[in-house]
């Protein structure tokens, strides 16, 4: 894995600070909710950065794109008072939480908000903070369900994968019946694309495994 230091300029308060930029990394396998297993240090913790002065958080492109006045007001009202969280050793999952909230205020897609909360849960897991992991899983699964309901998924393959992920998040939250319902729904979605998308063969095996002998690791 290689890093390169970069200077970020906050689009809200114009504070300047140095951040590590991940240039390359490798992974081997993944958890059942798609969290990758990285060799050595997990780059996930440094992919999203946040300004400790005002609380703005984002990927490098978010820092370049700027923020509307309406979102800035919400950042100053809800996130600036919480910048102390960004100074804690476990700050990485707070950065993803802040990002998810900002994306919601920007009216980004439910998929983008859900993904940010999902990644927050991954970081909380690596930090062995079960309370935060469960909190972010609940926030994530609600947005993924919403994305499916309003038709945000681009195609049938994505619907099958997201339906599986919803099931696995419910399983991790000890919601067994909901998990089984969503695994079966994923299988139904998958049946509509199985003949045309051989790349999803793994998903059929994973659904079967999670229904019969659940595991926290992806097959």
Image: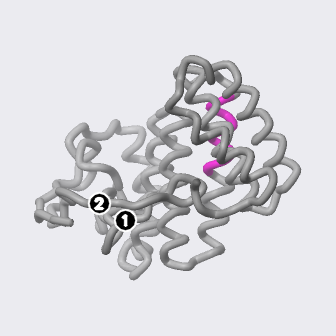
Q: Residues within 10 Å of mark 2 (few under 14, many from 20)?
A: few
| Farthest bottom residue in view | 89
Bounds of the magenta span? 140-148
Res 208 visible? yes
Secondary structure, mark 2, is loop
For the stretch drawn in magenta, the main secondary structure is helix
Residue at the outermost right position: 177
> For the C terminus, which image quadrant?
bottom right
Residue drawn at point x = 66 percent, y = 29 percent = 148
- Checking the image for residue 38, the label placed there is 1
Frontmost residue, 203 versus 98? 203
Report the number of numbered marks: 2
Q: Nearer the viewer, residue 57 or 199?
A: 199
In the image, residue 194 sits, relative to residue 52, either above or below, namely above
Q: Which comes sooner in the sequence, label 1 or label 2?
A: 2
Image quadrant containing the N terminus: bottom left
- Location of residue 57 in the rendering, given as x and y in whole percent from the top left corner: 35, 55
What residue sits 44% from the left and 36% below the top? 106
Q: Secondary structure at mark 1?
A: strand
The span from disc 1 to disc 2 (Cα, nearest Å) is 6 Å
Q: Is residue 141 magenta?
A: yes
Residue where numbered disc 2 is placed: 26
Q: Is residue 197 magenta?
A: no
> Does 5 sit above or below residue 138?
below
The foreground one among 214 and 97 is 214
Residue at image x 52%, y 21%?
154
Q: Residue at x 44, y 74 (%)?
A: 85
Left or right: residue 17 versus residue 136 is left
Q: Are marks 1 and 2 in contact (CB under 8 Å)?
A: yes
Residue 117 is left or right of residue 176, and the answer is: left
Evaluate whether residue 54 shows in this view.
no
């Amino acid at each position: 894995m290689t890093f390169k230091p970069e200077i970020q300029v906050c689009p809200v308060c114009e504070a300047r600070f140095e951040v590590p930029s991940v240039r390359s990394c490798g992974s081997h396998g993944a958890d059942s909710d798609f969290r990758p297993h990285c060799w050595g240090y997990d780059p996930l913790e440094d992919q999203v950065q946040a300004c400790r002065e005002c609380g703005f958080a984002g990927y490098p492109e978010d820092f370049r794109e700027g923020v509307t006045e309406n979102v800035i007001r919400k950042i100053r009202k809800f996130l600036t008072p919480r910048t102390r969280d960004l100074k804690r050793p476990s700050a990485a999952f707070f950065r993803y939480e802040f990002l998810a909230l900002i994306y919601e205020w920007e009216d980004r897609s439910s998929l983008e908000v859900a993904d940010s909360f999902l990644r927050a849960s991954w970081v909380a897991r690596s930090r062995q903070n079960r309370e935060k992991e469960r909190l972010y899983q609940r926030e994530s699964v609600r947005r993924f369900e919403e994305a499916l309901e309003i038709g945000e998924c681009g195609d049938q393959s994505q619907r099958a994968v997201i339906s599986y992920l919803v099931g696995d998040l419910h399983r991790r939250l000890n919601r067994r019946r909901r998990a089984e319902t969503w695994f079966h729904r994923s299988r139904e979605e998958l049946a509509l694309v199985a003949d045309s998308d051989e790349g999803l063969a793994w998903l059929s095996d994973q659904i079967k495994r999670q229904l019969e002998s659940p595991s926290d690791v992806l097959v």
